[in-house]
Image: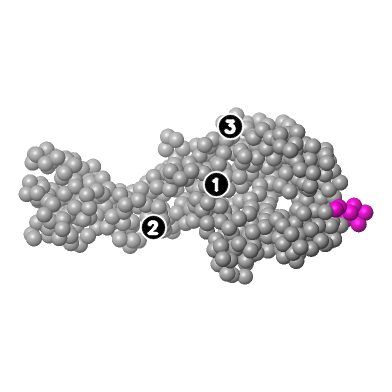
Amino acid sequence: MAEQIKTQSAHWGDKAVDLLLQQRGEGPFLIASGISPSGRIHVGNLREVLTADIMYRILKERGHEAKLIFVADDYDALRKVYPFLDPAVYEKYVGCPLSEIPAPDGSDLTYAEYFLQPFVKSLKKLKIDAHVVRASELYRDGVLKKQIIQALNARDEIAEILTRITGKEIGEDWSPFNPHCRLCGNMKTTKLVKWHPETEEITYYCSHCDKERTVPVVGNGKLTWRADWPARWAALGVDVEPFGKDHGGKGGSYDTGKEIVRKIYGGVEPFPIIYEWIRLKGLGDMSSSKGNVVSVDEVLEVVPPDVLRYFITRPAPKASLALDLVTQLLNLVDEVDDESKKQRDARSVELSQAGGFVPLHIPFNHLVNVWQVAGGDFEKVKKILTRTGFKYSDEAALLERCHYADEWLKRYATPEFIFQLLDETPAEIVPLISDEEKKALSLIADELEKNPEADGNAIHQIIYNIANSTGVSMGNLCKALYRVTLGRDRGPRAGWFVAMAGNDQIASRIRKFLAK
């Protein structure tokens, strides 16, 4: 028997597993998550999968038998022509299953696989050990046959449950099963005419084809969502499943599913974990249909897998979570990398391990600046880090972190973070530097030449002292320094920027400017 470990951990995952074991015994446990691949599978979707993965990891950690599955709802119908689709191509496919319409790129993949495959690759990078189950195969292979028959036989009872719990009237022509017309491929233009329990066939009418047909129930349609979800619980034996707040509210599909799975399918509802949606800072909740998303594979080009896992799994699932692609990503890398960070949650870091993450103890923001000062030259990066007092033990890990810095600059950095060390001060900058500022810059060059080994702190003090002695404000003097070396009004903290670039190099740039 697996040992039921009592934990004092404050992490939501440990608490949830404690409650699960208390309510459901020792297992084994089947943990499920699921997404409809109707568009780019985004970081918001990842909250469901990672919540399931945390439960799986903790159960395995404690010695309990557990399995994790990811159900791709690829038998869902295309609901509408989304903004990212060509209406001329996709209007005719509205109502057709995602698993049976073409990919947006014209490749041999189906629409569903076009969006699903990059996500599955991302799951591997994130070390999420999930078995992928496709809904189209569940229906095609008859895995849900028993539940389909039960639902059709209990149509009136399901309708009563839905009406009572949701408060919405169910029409007399409603059916828990949507036929799939194999002539035109549509599920939206069909209507169930009759269920034949003795032959396990259905008769349906398709308004698009203007035909009535009788076909076997298996492989020719799909249960409606509120009947489909609990059918999966019963057929697959799902014990734990996270789901969004839209399904978990009063009268939501979990409420109706609990009663349907017990009364109609003879099963039990899974242990629920309700999560809040992830927002994009300044843009609202992520939505594939609106195109307001950042895909998982895209973010994994910018931060290590451990960092993305940490971002999502540190707060409790019900906590509000907004993704800031600019400063937050920089800070998150440091939070995972540096054990001394005050806000760092060690248990979340432990549960976020995806393999291959090597702590460098080099602030990510600093590395972003070093990368730019070095002009993207890795050999120069190493020299600058050594010169500025940063040690690293793993060159391959440093190179990988530089790749992340480079991708962050290309994809998400706002203008104030981006700069380039110039060989020549732009001509239009020259008139902007006052005579007083030129004198102060000359004094900075003098001090840098006298103190070629001065570090960032010492250089900052040099600039501060010269500002005080010349009457040029610290702000204006730093601005003048940035204008001469970067051609812009702002840059990294002045003293540390000079140290990164090299005292002699900055002194030389100043002399070159003053000689004009």
Residue 280 rendering spot, x and y as whole percentages: 47, 45
Depth order, front residue of 70/360: 70
**Within the image, what quadrant is residue 394 found in?**
bottom left
- Report x, y in % for residue 72: 66, 54
**x, y (%) of residue 158?**
80, 41
Q: Which residue is mark 2?
A: 410
Question: For residue 44, which numbered disc appears in the image?
Answer: 1
Circle 1 packing at 10 Å, graded few (<14), some (14-19), many (20+), is many
The span from disc 1 to disc 2 (Cα, nearest Å) is: 22 Å
Q: Is residue 24 left or right of residue 342?
A: right
Q: Amino acid at mark 2?
A: Lys
Q: Which residue is mark 3?
A: 9
Magenta range: 194-200
Q: Secondary structure at mark 1?
A: helix
Relative to residue 288, is residue 271 depicted above or below?
above
Q: Secondary structure at mark 3?
A: loop
Disc nearest the viewer among 3 and 2: 2
| Residue 141 lies in the magenta stretch | no
Q: CA distance from mark 3 to mark 2?
A: 39 Å
The secondary element bearing badge 2 is classed as helix
